Amino acid sequence: MSDEFLTSFTPRIIDVVERDPAFWEDFNYLLLRDKTKLHTLSYVYHGAGTLEIDGEKYQLQAGHLFQVRPGVNMRITTDPKFPVCFISFHFLYRLVRWENGEMLSVDSIAKLPICGDVFPIGQVNIEESFRKAFHLWQSKSKNYEWLVKLEFLNNVQAVNELASRELEQSSTASMIEKASAYIRTNYQENITREIIAEYVSLSPGYLSITFKKHTGVSLIEYVTKIRLDRAKFLLKSTKLPVKQIADDCGFTDSFYFSRIFSRDTGMNPRDYRNA
């Protein structure tokens, strides 16, 4: 979610509701809306069910967050033996900005850009906050609307931070795989940290840190491993001289190759070939 959206996001909470087993008994385990009127942000704390939005189906289970925007056909079904239970904020929102000292705003029916229609929360525990908001709404105590809005905004921020971290991790993982693929393809060439970093558009230092974090080995160790694995294959499957195999696998010094090979396998290349 962009800073611009967060700055202009101005919600109005309409209701906070809980859909528990008693609710599903009354509704025969089917919740149907031909055209939704409000935004809904919900946290599933128990059970399982199926959410259908304009014909697209999603599985719901405990730990999932889901949202529904206005103007869609929504259907939720669940099993009487394991009914899906959740707490929902029902709300409207406007995007507000200031221009030349005047406030400009517009209604929005777009879903919140914090996650998809259904989003696994994982380790982020927001059930307590959703439940607190529900009890505050039911209590109608002093400033309850303001306090509920604070809980809502805190939840939006928590999910936004989680989604941002996952996006960053996904992007980084993609870069690490791109670097690994480059090494696997070009192991015969002179490969340096700087060459790989330029290829994946990361700084050399950041690439080194994240590569080891994601793979468990350093860049140099990974390059050496790929070259040694190829050398083992050639030693067993061909009669090429050891020096040529070293050259073909990216080792410019055959004596260095023999030393590294022996350290890895406990045997020199010739003994490995005859083993």
Image (cartoon, rainbow, N blue to C red):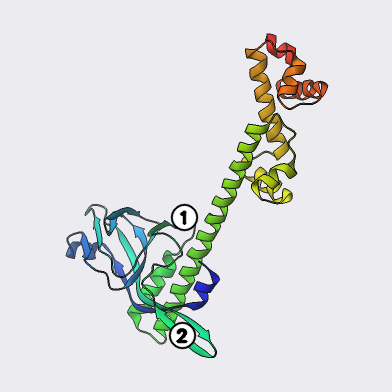
Badge 2, how many Cα within 10 Å: few under 14, some, many 20+?
Answer: few
Distance between the alpha carbons at the discs numbered 2 and 1: 37 Å
Of the numbered discs 2 and 1, the one sitting upstream in the chain is: 2
Which residue carries the number 1 mark? 122
- Give the residue drawn at x 60%, y 47%: 175
Side of 201 where 256 appears, left or right: right
Of 100 and 128, the residue lying toward us = 100
Residue placed at 31% from the left, 73% from the top?
A: 38
Q: How far from the left and from the top, in percent, is residue 27?
A: 18, 64
Which dot marks residue 104?
A: 2
The number of numbered badges drawn on the structure is 2
Q: Is residue 207 above or below residue 187?
A: below
The image quadrant that residue 93 belongs to is bottom left
Image-quadrant location for residue 255: top right
Local crowd at mark 1 within 10 Å, few (<14), some, or many (≥20)? few
Say which element carries label 2: strand
